[in-house]
Amino acid sequence: MIILTLSAALPQLRPPPCEGNQICQEANGNQLAVLYLSLLLAALGSGGIRPCVAAFGADQFVEEDPKHPKKTWVYFNWYYFALGASILLASTVLVYIQDNVGWSWGLGIPTIAMALSIIVFLIGYPLYRNLDPAGSPYTRVLQVFVAAFRKRKTPLVSEPKFLYVNEELDASISTDGLLHHTKQLKFLDKAAIMTEEDAVKSSEKPNLWRLNTVHRVEELKSILRMLPIWAAGILFATSAAQQNTFSLQQAKSMDRHLTKSFEIPSASMSVFVTFSMLITIVLYDRLLVPVARKFTGLDQGINFLHRMAIGFFISILATLVAGFIEVKRKHAALANGLIDSPKSTIPILVFWLVPQYSLHGIAEAFMVIGHLEFFYNQAPESMRSTATALFWTSISAGDYTSTLLVTLVHKFTNWLPNKNLNKGKLECFYWLLTFLQFLNFVYYLICAKFYTFKPLQSQRTDHGGDQCGEGVELASQV
């Protein structure tokens, strides 16, 4: 952020400003290098902080304290609320500063805010609950794969009790409790079968490239079981990506005047997504959860799989509505003879787009937070940052899928013309996406129906049951 701010503030690091009809001078190689370096560092920083801050914050809820049951669902609600509020602030106040005061101030303010947040974090660091590093989880995953492959010809044992268990070896990666053996993905169980070559004394550490504990095998199984539901989130992100592409083009062609002198920037329409998401989070936490709790008996009202299903369904409605709004926009263009005038403003208020933007925001409040909670809750405790990183990769994969889908539609249809959206069939693209989302929704329901929740060996009855008990209860409701 410092480099990015300097590139906007120092004349040497940016091309000179343009005045009037003057031809703008392009940035030279050094200026572009500084800009790309700053963006690269920002991307690397985001990739590091986003998955870690969510898991680190949830880890502050101490599971062992019976007076304070772990309520990570509350944390994720307000974590995402804070994230949404910051996006709303950035897309309104900071954009106004950048346009009317200058880019150096527009970038400098978040840079100062970031520096202050680091200082506050360092001051409060001694108060945080920190989990000691326990080795690379990726190494453990690879060890299980290698051990299972090396014993691929070894017959499976008749009972799970014959598999290798070493509580002392797994103590540092199982503070919440050891993972129970599950019946899925049995070929990986071979990594925990002790053969004559693996014979070790109870005090010795085995060769983990040949023999692994049940807990380590179940860690890998937990990650693999999450992947189908991870994949279901890709099309959700693909649908959401349209709000920054085609919905933006729709808004540009519509009447955006609030008054005769004030016109809403088309890019600012995304504020309705964020605003509806924030309102939904508050209503969900303060209204829906207490009401649902009376019917389900769950502290969180509904479990994260149900929450995600609601989000998927609302997202389908949002895309379906977007298609009908596009039909209305083109009818207005046809009625006013503007079909062949792509740069003309169609006399239809831009607020017709608010329903689709708002529905996407409501869907995000349900699905995205449920998705994030799912990854944290179901991941092995030593892989929670990795699991929350999977959440962000599903969003990235959704953006790439959107690009691929648009490319294919461009290649095989004339729905999305480059120069005149009025002559295209954007509504058909939206309805194609609606159909794909419906198939994805069915796929998700099947995955959720047969999903096996992470089973913990530790039993807790002091305040409402253990995590395993909750998992069995959730599985029976899906």
Image: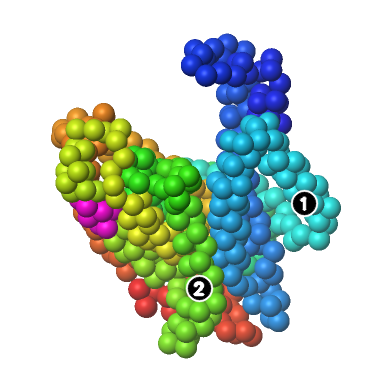
In the rendered structure, the answer to whether residue 323 lies left or right of residue 155 reads left
Taking the spot 35% from the left edge, 73% from the top edge, the residue there is 478
Percent of width and height locating residue 34? 63, 20
In this rendering, position of residue 130 left or right of residue 364: right
Q: Which residue is mark 1?
A: 121
What amino acid type should be assigned to the residue bearing mark 2? Leu
SS under mark 1: helix
Q: Residue at x 60, y 19 (%)?
A: 17
Say how many tags the image has: 2
Identify the mark at residue 283; answer none if there is no mark.
2
The picture quadrant where one finds residue 30 is top right
Res. 183 in view: no
Q: Quadrant of residue 28?
A: top right
- Give the overall secondary structure of the magenta segment: helix
Q: Nearer the viewer, residue 254 or 386?
A: 254
Residue type at mark 1? Phe
Where 90 falls versus 71 (above or below)? above
Residue bounds of the magenta highlight: 320-328
Residue at left offset 25%, top offset 62%: 442
